[in-house]
């Protein structure tokens, strides 16, 4: 029976039996399995970059055993026509290599180089009249290697995804515990200072109708930018609005942080940072950064990096008290006029510079004057009086605090 009369073997399915000559050639090569596996694990694979750094037991025991199993499985399947569908062994080993951190390219090359060495062994054993038999086994070997490499790569990547998700959730759990001031279970408590960041994405990111996939990509990019900026995997709890970041052992954000985050989250990003003296101080720092971001947004400070010193007066004015409700009520006549509220906020942020206010709102300065006059008529506040200006600013801040403004 010639090669053309046989169906193409398919590793992973029940193969058609190879020709008797091909089966005989495979059977003659089987006694070399142990020696071939040792030579691969401690010779052939050594040429791979990074292989020499693997632990000795991994090379001498586990990789050698995998090579031995693969060679014997192929040769016996070729010799007696048994099924070649035992991919679970290779998938389990691939998951183990992923957990150990062995690079995927290195793992896959052990399989491709192993297939080449097996082919060379078959070629050395083959006699002058076994050219057709060798061709059959070569084609079967290519098919087998293709199926095994595919299964190995899939299993490795699945395990990596699972491990990454597990590490991510562990970091989120630790971050939540620190931010909430709860006991940290199953992880070491940071010893020393902790930097706490509050991030708020712009309104376009929050209300722009991002799909779940797009949102996940945004959060991954932000996490990656944070990791690059600090040179480590930072602890973060982020969602579509933003969130908090906890970085143990750091007291100041790196200078390039803002730029890296702008590249990933856009120019509307707001960021505030505060150092906690200990892990127990993290909740206070988190509350402070949230408030600084909120106050900066409420009083019209442009997006960027916000410090408490930059909004110190506004922060003080935004603290609730028994008089807060009465102060907020001063703006009640503007409830149905959002354009007047925006004008008031922008005008106060621009230190009552009508031209700067007009430029930011794309209005003529005269239109700004008309709006300011209407605000004064409706509220009774005199925006030329420093006391009334302070009341207007406090009213804006307290009003937005009640509304939960975080943009």
Image (cartoon, rainbow, N blue to C red):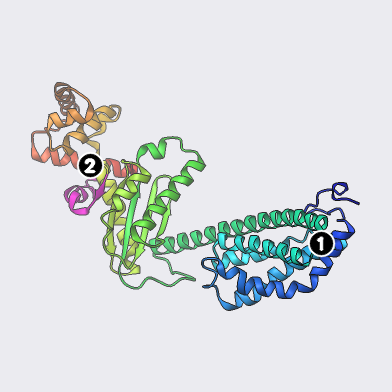
Asked whether the residues under the numbered discs 1 and 2 touch, taking CB atoms below 8 Å apart as contact, a structural biologist would say no
Of residues 98 and 393, the one drawn nearer to the viewer in this rendering: 98
- What label sits on residue 383 in the rendered view? none
Residue 120 is situated, as x and y percent measured from the top left of the image, at 71, 64
Of residues 218 and 70, the one drawn nearer to the viewer in this rendering: 70
Q: Is residue 239 visible?
A: no
Q: Earlier in the sequence, mark 1 or mark 2?
A: 1
Q: CA distance from mark 1 to mark 2?
A: 85 Å
User: SS for tag 2?
Assistant: loop
Which residue is label 2 attached to? Answer: 301
Of residues 342 and 55, the one drawn nearer to the viewer in this rendering: 55
52 up-or-down from 199: above or below: below
Residue sitting at 69 percent across and 72 percent down? 37
User: SS for tag 1?
Assistant: loop
Residue sitting at 9 percent across and 39 percent down? 386
Q: How many marks?
A: 2
Q: Is residue 16 visible?
A: yes
Circle 2 residues within 10 Å: few <14, some 14–19, many ≥20: some
Q: Quadrant of the C terminus?
A: top left
- Give the number of the mark in front: 1 or 2: 1
Which residue is label 1 attached to? Answer: 128
237 up-or-down from 348: above or below: below
Q: Quadrant of residue 334?
A: top left
Is 311 magenta? The answer is yes
Q: With 244 as the anchor, is 272 left or right in this view?
A: left
Q: Which residues are magenta?
A: 304-326
Is 249 magenta? The answer is no
Residue 224 is situated, as x and y percent measured from the top left of the image, at 41, 53
Residue sitting at 52 percent across and 66 percent down? 49
Residue 398 is situated, as x and y percent measured from the top left of the image, at 26, 44
């Amino acid at each position: 029976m010639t090669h053309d009369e046989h169906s193409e073997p398919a590793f992973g399915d029940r193969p058609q039996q190879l020709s008797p000559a091909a089966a005989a050639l495979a059977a003659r090569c089987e006694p070399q399995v142990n020696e071939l596996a040792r030579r691969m694990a401690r010779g052939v694979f050594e040429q791979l970059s990074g292989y020499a750094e693997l632990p000795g037991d991994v090379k001498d025991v586990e990789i050698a055993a995998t090579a031995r199993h693969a060679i014997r499985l192929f040769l016996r399947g070729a010799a007696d026509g048994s099924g070649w569908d035992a991919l679970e062994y290779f998938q389990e080993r691939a998951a183990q290599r992923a957990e150990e951190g062995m690079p995927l390219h290195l793992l896959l090359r052990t399989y491709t180089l192993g297939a080449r060495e097996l082919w060379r062994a078959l070629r050395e054993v083959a006699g002058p009249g076994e050219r057709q038999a060798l061709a059959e086994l070569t084609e079967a070997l290519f098919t087998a290697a293709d199926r095994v490499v595919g299964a190995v790569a899939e299993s490795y990547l699945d395990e990596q995804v699972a491990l990454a998700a597990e590490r991510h959730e562990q970091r989120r759990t630790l971050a939540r515990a620190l931010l909430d001031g709860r006991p940290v279970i199953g992880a070491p408590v940071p010893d020393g200072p902790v930097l706490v960041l509050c991030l708020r994405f712009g309104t376009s990111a929050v209300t722009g109708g991002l799909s779940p996939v797009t949102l996940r990509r945004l959060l991954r990019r932000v996490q990656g930018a944070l990791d690059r900026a600090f040179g480590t995997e930072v602890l973060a709890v982020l969602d579509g609005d933003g969130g908090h970041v906890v970085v143990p052992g750091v007291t100041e954000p790196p200078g390039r942080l803002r730029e890296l985050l702008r590249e990933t989250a856009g120019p509307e990003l707001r960021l505030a940072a505060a150092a906690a003296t200990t892990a127990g101080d993290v909740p206070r720092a988190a509350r402070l950064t949230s408030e600084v971001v909120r106050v900066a947004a409420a009083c019209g400070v442009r997006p960027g990096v916000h410090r408490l010193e930059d909004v110190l007066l506004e922060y003080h004015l935004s603290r609730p008290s028994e008089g807060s409700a009465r102060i907020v009520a001063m703006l009640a006549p503007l409830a149905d006029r959002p354009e007047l509220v925006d004008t008031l906020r922008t005008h106060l942020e621009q230190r009552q510079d009508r031209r700067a206010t007009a430029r930011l709102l794309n209005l003529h300065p005269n239109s700004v004057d008309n709006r300011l006059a209407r605000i004064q008529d409706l509220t009774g506040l005199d925006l030329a009086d420093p006391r009334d200006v302070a009341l207007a600013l406090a009213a804006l801040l307290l009003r937005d605090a009640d509304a939960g403004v975080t943009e």
